[in-house]
Amino acid sequence: MFKIKEQFLTDYKGKQVGVLLDLRQYRKLLEQAEELDAIRAYDAAQTSREKPIPFEQAIKEIEQRRK
């Protein structure tokens, strides 16, 4: 994990309403979130009782649903 150096935005009452991040930190957080989503999807697929299908078939089904 890396050290996050954030700056908080506050409203006129001093309540924190937002945060500023260095662009590199923001991109790293997005990258880590995407990786975590992929891991969770993989874990869910592994514990699922559904029968696996070939990749090509999955792509065809996804494309058909988009139409």
Image: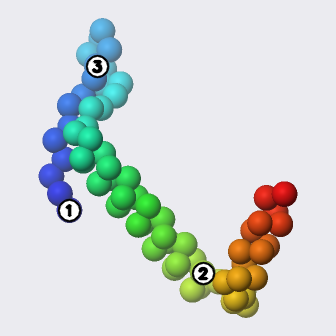
**Quarter placement of the N terminus:** bottom left
Q: CA distance from mark 3 to mark 1?
A: 27 Å
Q: Is residue 2 above or below residue 47?
A: above
Q: Nearer the viewer, residue 54 or 49?
A: 54
Residue under label 1: 1
Is 38 left or right of 9, judged from the image as shown? right
**Nearer-N-terminus badge (2/1):** 1
**Nearer-N-terminus badge (3/2):** 3
Amino acid on which disc 2 is placed: Ala
**Nearer-N-terminus badge (3/1):** 1
Q: CA distance from mark 2 to mark 1?
A: 26 Å
Residue under label 2: 45
Task: Tell me how the rendering is colored.
Answer: rainbow
Question: Residue 53 placed where, x, y %?
Answer: 72, 88
Residue under label 3: 10
Mark 2 Cα-neighbour bin, 10 Å: few <14, some 14–19, many ≥20: few
Q: Residue at x 70, y 88 (%)?
A: 54
**Quadrant housing residue 10:** top left
Q: Residue at x 24, y 47 (%)?
A: 24
Q: Nearer the viewer, residue 52 or 48?
A: 52
| SS type, badge 2 | helix
| SS type, badge 1 | loop
User: Do tag 2 and tag 1 residues touch (Cβ < 8 Å)?
Assistant: no
Q: Is residue 34 above or below residue 12?
A: below
Q: Residue at x 83, y 66 (%)?
A: 64
Q: CA distance from mark 3 to mark 2?
A: 42 Å
**Quadrant housing residue 31:** bottom left
Is 53 left or right of 10, judged from the image as shown? right
Q: Is residue 12 above or below residue 24?
A: above
Is 54 left or right of 9, judged from the image as shown? right
Amino acid on which disc 3 is placed: Thr
Q: Is residue 44 above or below residue 67?
A: below
